[in-house]
Amino acid sequence: MTSHVMPTYKRLPVTFSHGEGAWLWDEDGNRYLDALSGIAVTSLGHAHPAVHKALCEQSQKLLHTSNIYRIAVQEQLADQLIARSGMDNVFFSNSGAEANEAAIKIARKYGNGLGIATPTIIVMERSFHGRTMATLSATGNSKIKEGFAPLVEGFVQVPYNDIAAIENVLANNANIVAILVEAVQGEGGVNVPAADYLNRIRALCDQHNLLMMMDEIQTGIGRTGQFLAYQHNGLLPDVCTLAKALGNGVPIGACLARGKAAGVLTAGNHGSTFGGNPLACSAALAVLATLDADHLTDAAASKGKAIFDGFVARLQGNPHVVDIRYKGLMIGIELDAPCAELVTQALDKFLLINVTNDKTIRLLPPLIIDDQQIAQLVDSLSGLIQAHTGQHHE
C-alpha cells in the first residue's frame, strides 16, 4: 500500500490501535511493553483517565480563542509551572523546538540589549535542541545538519561535561551571551555529566553576565526524580524549556524565564497561534495534578534505580557492555558497537525501545511502570543484549 506521508521517518513495521498504562496493542491484537513513552512523552502512560477527562471536559467548552485574549487555563498552568520551577514567567508554544526557539530569541535580544552586535550562544557536542533552522544549528550532531546549509550563525560548540572548554571560549570570544545545555543528554546517548557540572556553568554565567539556559524538554516533568533536573543541583537557570511529557501526548511547549531574562520579550517580539490554547493547557494541568497525587516524581527516582540495578546484575561481566547510565527513568546501556538492530529484535519480543547515538540503548519508560513490568523489561532486554553480543543468557 502506497503512503502519501512524506518519508521523513524510518518507521517500524507496526501500527498501534490503542494503549493503556505502559501497554500498547497493535492492529493484530498483540500487546507490547512501552519502554520508550513516545520518546519521553507519555509519562503517565497511555489513555490516562485524568488526561482523558480533562480533554473531554475542555473540548466541550472551548478549544481555541487565540492569544489576543486572556486564557484562564493558560494562566493557571503558568502559575503551576512557576510555583514548581522557581522561575518568573512563561511563554507557551506547541513543541520543544519552538520552546528552544523562544530561548534563542531571548538570548539574542538580551545580547543586543547589551550592545553586542553578534550575540553568540555556547552549545554542546552531541546535544539535541530541535529541527527548526535555529535549533538545528544549535544541535551538536553533524549528521542531522547535512544538506541544510547555510545554517543559522551565532553558536559555538564545545564538548559536553567539559568546563575548561567553556572557559577557553569565554576567554577568547567577547560575543558570548548565553550557555544552552541539557541536564542529561538524551538523544546524545543518555550522557550524565559530573555532579557539579551544571553548578560550575551557573557560576560562569554569573561571573560573565551570561544567561544559563536549560533544555529540560526530555529531562523535565519528573523524569529524573525531580520535577526539573536542575533541581538536583540546587540552582536556578535564567531560562528553562519544557515540552514532551508536559501534555502526555497533547502538543505543548513552554519557555520559562527568570530575573534579567524574564523581561526581555515584550508585546510584538514573539507569538504563537496555537501556543497555550485551552485544550493543551487543560491536559498539562491534569498531568501536573497526577504527578502530585500519585507521587510519580519520587517514583521515577526509585524505579529508575531498580531498573539500573537490574541491568547491572544481569549484564555484569559482559565485555561488550561499555557502560550503564541513568538519572531517574532515563536509562542508557552503551555497547561497544552499533546496535540499531536491537530495536527490531525487541519489537519482535513485544518490547519498545530505542537506540540513540548508534551504540546506546535508550529507555524512557512511563513513570507509572510497575514492578512486574520492570522485571519483564530487564529480563527481556538483558536476554536480547546477551544474545546480540554473543554472551550466554543466564
Image (tube, rainbow, N blue to C red):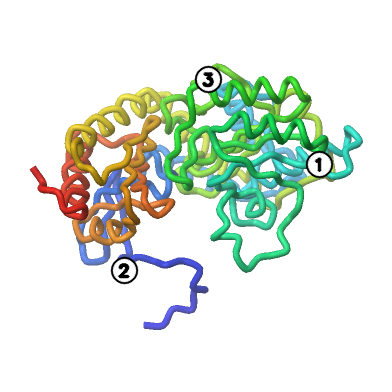
Identified at 66% across, 20% down, the residue is 203
State which tag comes first along the sequence, 1 or 2: 2
Q: Which residue is mark 3?
A: 233
Where is 311 relative to 383, above or below? above
The residue indicated by pointer 2 is 13
Q: Is residue 283 visible?
A: no
Q: Residue at x 22, y 49 (%)?
A: 385
Image coords of residue 153 (percent x, y) = 76, 52
C-alpha gap between disc 3 and disc 2:
41 Å
At a point 48% along the width and 46% down the height, the residue shown is 188
- Give the mark nearest the N terminus, 3 or 2: 2
Q: At 45% from the left edge and 33% from the top edge, which residue is drawn?
A: 192
* Of the pair 82 and 176, the residue shown nearer to us: 176
| Front position in the image: 247 or 185 | 185
Q: Quadrant of residue 377?
A: top left
Other-residue count near label 3 (Cα within 10 Å), few / some / many at <14 / 14–19 / ≥20: few
The residue indicated by pointer 1 is 119
- Identify the amino acid type marked 1: Pro
**Residue 121 spot, x, y in % from top left:** 72, 40
Q: In the rendering, at what x and y percent does residue 6 appear?
A: 52, 73
